Amino acid sequence: MYKPFCQLAERTLRIPGAPEHPPGDEHTAQVFQAAPNFYKYLLATWALTTAALLVPAAVLTALPALGGFALMNRGNKWGILLFAVSFLILAGFVLARLFALAIVRLDFDKRWYVVTDRSLRIREGIIHVREMTVNFANIQNISISQGPIQRLLAITDLRVDTAGGGGDSQDHSHHNQSENLHTAFFRGINNASELRGLIQDRIRHLKDSGLGDHEALAPPATLAGPSAVLSVLREIQNEAVALNKVLLRSG
């Protein structure tokens, strides 16, 4: 049942396939996805969300059912309608959570990470697809984070901050905006230390080869000293005197 839904979702949501390689040597490109345990992490998140929604869903389902049962005891046929409303609420909840479960699987399958010798590219998201390319020359900070459930599953998140990212900012609104524009995440990987070392080695290689350095700026022009200014003024004066003599002779 998952494959037909996946194909339908890809056509309906126009989910792109595997991303193209970012700038760099394709022979050095490494293409991989999140670790299998990341899918278990997504399932755990789905299960916790479902459990949190179960109580309000049960209340919304029980209220019309109880009202329908009371009306039916009084011989009122409108009780059947309330039973139907209760059934629709329950069916809607079940279908919504099954749809969310399928989205979880798609989110895992359609998440891609690509690393070349000069840059990296990350593709994630189903409803909102986010693809980000980062040149190693622009990377300012690489950090690793791991929550309790991630530690249990032996997976981590690798965060890459680029110029202007403001990774240590205390302003949450600014932090969220900068995270969208200047922060890339390798989520749910089981080789974060190795990947961080690989990125650091390639950044070091770019700096050593000079490919990651900005173009050297030309030295600023020096201001003329007082003696140079006086020399220029004398030349202007001499030219003015000579021009005045020529005008007097012609007159």
Image (cartoon, rainbow, N blue to C red):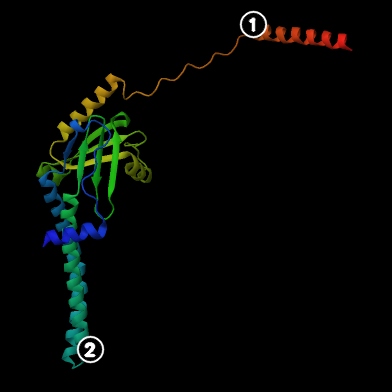
Could you say where residue 91 lies in the image, as x and y percent from the top left? 17, 72
User: Of discs 2 and 1, which sits in the foreground?
Assistant: 1
- Secondary element under disc 2, as helix, strand or loop, is helix
In the shown orientation, is residue 35 left or right of residue 163? left
Q: Is residue 148 above or below residue 218?
A: below
Check the image and name the residue furthest to the bottom.
Answer: 75
Q: Is residue 209 above or below residue 127?
A: above
In whole angstroms, how far apart are the C-alphas of marks 2 and 1? 105 Å
Could you say where residue 190 lies in the image, as x and y percent from the top left? 12, 39
Residue 186 versus residue 89: which sits nearer the camera?
186
Q: What quarter of the picture does the N terminus occupy?
A: bottom left
Disc sitting over residue 78 in the figure: 2
Q: Is residue 168 above or below residue 94?
A: above
Q: Residues within 10 Å of mark 1 (few under 14, many from 20)?
A: few
Could you say where residue 76 lies in the image, as x and y percent from the top left? 21, 92
Q: What quarter of the picture does the C terminus occupy?
A: top right
Q: Residues within 10 Å of mark 2 (few under 14, many from 20)?
A: few
Q: Residue at x 50, y 17 (%)?
A: 220
Check the image and name the residue furthest to the right.
Answer: 251
Residue 208 versus residue 154: which sits nearer the camera?
208
In the shown orientation, is residue 21 left or right of residue 225? left
Residue 178 versus residue 139: which sits nearer the camera?
139
Q: Quadrant of residue 174?
A: top left
Residue 5 versus residue 225: which sits nearer the camera?
5
Question: What residue is shown with label 1?
Answer: 227
Q: Quadrant of residue 222?
A: top right
Q: Earlier in the sequence, mark 2 or mark 1?
A: 2
Could you say where residue 135 lies in the image, as x and y percent from the top left? 30, 33
Q: Amino acid at mark 1?
A: Ser
Q: Residue at x 12, y 60 (%)?
A: 2
- Secondary element under disc 1, as helix, strand or loop, is helix
